[in-house]
Every structure is written in C-alpha cells, then in structure tokens.
Image (tube, grey):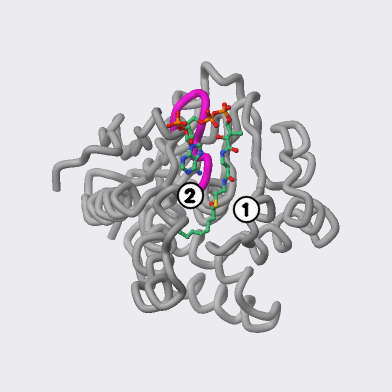
Amino acid sequence: MAYEMILVETQGRVGVITLNRPQALNALCDQLMTELGDALRGFDADPTVGAIVITGSPKAFAAGADIKEMKDRTYPAVHFDDFIGKRWETVLTIQKPVIAAVAGFALGGGCELAMMCDLILAADNAKFGQPEINLGIIPGAGGTQRLVRSIGKSKAMEMVLTGRMMDAVEAERANLVCRIVPAADLIVEAVKMGEKMASLSAPSVAMAKEAINVAYETTLREGVRFERRLFLSLFSTEDQKEGMSAFAEKRKPSFTNR
Ligand code: CO8
C-alpha cells in the first residue's frame, strides 16, 4: 500500500510510524486510519522489528478524529460502517509493544489512539484532552473507559465534561504518561525505549504486554490466573533457558525468540 498520510521507517529494530497530515493537525480521517492499520500490521509481521513507535508532528500528535469528514454522517452510516471498530482498533491487535510518542495536541480520538497504545511517552509540550463535549458528542474510541482506568474518575469526569486539556506535567502526575522528555529528544527517546524492548526475548515481551493489558479487562483473580499461565508457558522457550543460564554464567543473554 502506498501511503499518503503517514511516514513509515525503521530505526534499528524499531518501526516508526509518523502521522503526517500537518495541514489538519493530523486529524484522523478514514484514509489515515486505514494506512496506520496497514503499517501496524506490516511491522507486526516483520521479524526484524521488535517494537513500534507511533508519533506525530511537533505541534500535534493528532487533534482528533476528522470533524469535517464526520459532520454529515448519519446514524445508519456510522452504525453499519463500523468505522471505529474496523479502522481504529487495529492497534489493540498488535502483539509487539506500541509506544505513543506524543508532542503537541493529543485531543479527542488522538488522545484515545495514544491510550490504545501500550504506553505514552510525552514531550514537554504535549497537551491531552477530550474536547468532544464541545461538539455535542462524547469520546467514541474508548476515551471514557480508558481515561477512568488511567487517571481515575474525578479527573476523567472533569476532562470529558468540560473539555479541559492537561499539560504534560499534569499528565505525568496523573499517570497518563510514563515519562516526559524534552520535545527535541522525543523520537530518540521513544526509539531508545523501543530498541531496549526489541533487544529482549520477543515471546516474553509479547506476553508481558498481553498480561498487563488484560489487567484492564478482567478481575484480579482472573488476571493473576492468566499471568500464571503465561509465566509457566515461557518455561517452554529456549529464551527462558538462555536468559537464566546467562545470568548464572555471568554473561549477556543471546535471545533467539524461540
Ligand atoms: N478535524 C478536522 N480538522 C481539524 C481538526 C479535526 N479534529 N483539528 C484541526 N483541524 C484543522 C483545522 O480545521 C484547520 O484547518 P484549516 O486551516 O483548513 O482551517 C487546521 O487543522 C489547523 O487548525 P487550527 O487553525 O484550529 O489550529 P489552532 O492552532 O488554532 O488550534 C486546536 C488547534 C486547538 C487543536 C484546534 O484545531 C481544535 O480545537 N481542533 C479540534 C479538536 C477536537 O475537537 N478534537 C476532537 C474531535 S472529535 C473526536 O476525536 C471523536 C473521536 C471519536 C472516535 C473515533 C471515531 C471516528
């Protein structure tokens, strides 16, 4: 697929996808989301890639779903097209870690896309918000659910009911983002983090992310059972033998992803 709205490259073992629709602050139109999904699936299937970074421009990660594209849609059209499920949720199906590297605005669907990634690294100029209420709608790609689980009910209520944006410092304090870095270093830092993940045993990295993500969708008892199954299954891998032998032999492990 030839891409018009995203840039795709690899840096070492990290796949980097840059949302590239600057004239619309990376508004997430159908074409952009289709291209993003295709690129994500491509990197997930590429054995030379161990982690994926999604980023935007210095001014905007993404200013939301494309309001101009959505404004005249009718209920039957949005219902039967299932544009949220089909185009927006691909990121949830990716086995490799996906890092959202956010500079500038991450609003509405942009904030929701970032929250669908496995973690968010924020530039110091990042701004997060769910301003849909100003448009007469509500978040529709998981914002009301993931924000509550991430930052708690009160802050989620305030953001969703007033549309107030959060800056990077507040977002870190509220646990929406893992870390803040200077805007100029955002991609370097995100790729460095991805490279670290890519250097580890791919089965354990994939299972670790799966186990953490399950914590959002199940009870503690079921989550712990799920974790234990994954943990025990890793004893069937060569990488578990290699990782533990290397520790005992005081050398660096050499993982083969088997
Ligand atoms: N959709 C379409 N175009 C947009 C969007 C958007 N979300 N955001 C910005 N643009 C366009 C502007 O229309 C403008 O285009 P033009 O130059 O042709 O007029 C260009 O980008 C630059 O924007 P501004 O001139 O407004 O730039 P400012 O720096 O003055 O303001 C803001 C930046 C504050 C980010 C402002 O652009 C803004 O408020 N944008 C809209 C933010 C918003 O409301 N987002 C939520 C959208 S709804 C949503 O995301 C629902 C998700 C539901 C789930 C997914 C289902 C599809």
Residue depicted at x 41% and y 69%: 85
Return the mark for residue 67: 2
Question: Up-down: is 152 above or below 27?
Answer: below
Which span of residues is magenta-colored? 56-65
Which label number is shown at residue 135? 1
**Do the residues bearing badges 1 and 2 touch, measured as CB atoms within 8 Å?**
yes
Residue at 57% over, 43% down: 120
- Number of marks in the rendered image: 2
* SS class, disc 2: helix
**Mark 1 surroundings: few (<14), some (14-19) or many (≥20) residues within 10 A:** few
Decide which of 163, 232 is in the foreground and name it: 163
Identify the residue at horizontal 22%, vertical 52% (top origin): 42
Q: Amino acid at mark 1?
A: Leu
Q: Nearer the viewer, residue 182 or 256?
A: 182
Q: Residue furthest front?
A: 72
Res. 183 image quadrant: top right
Residue 81: image location, x then y, percent = 34, 72
Which residue lies at the image location 50% right of the left edge and 36% below the top edge?
Answer: 61
Q: Is residue 62 one of those drawn in magenta? A: yes
Q: Is residue 194 above or below residue 240?
A: above
- Residue 50 magenta-drawn? no
Place residue 154 in its image quadrant: bottom right
Kind of element beneath mark 1: helix
Whether the residue carrying mark 1 lies under 8 Å from ligand 1 is answered with yes
The extreme top residue here reads 184
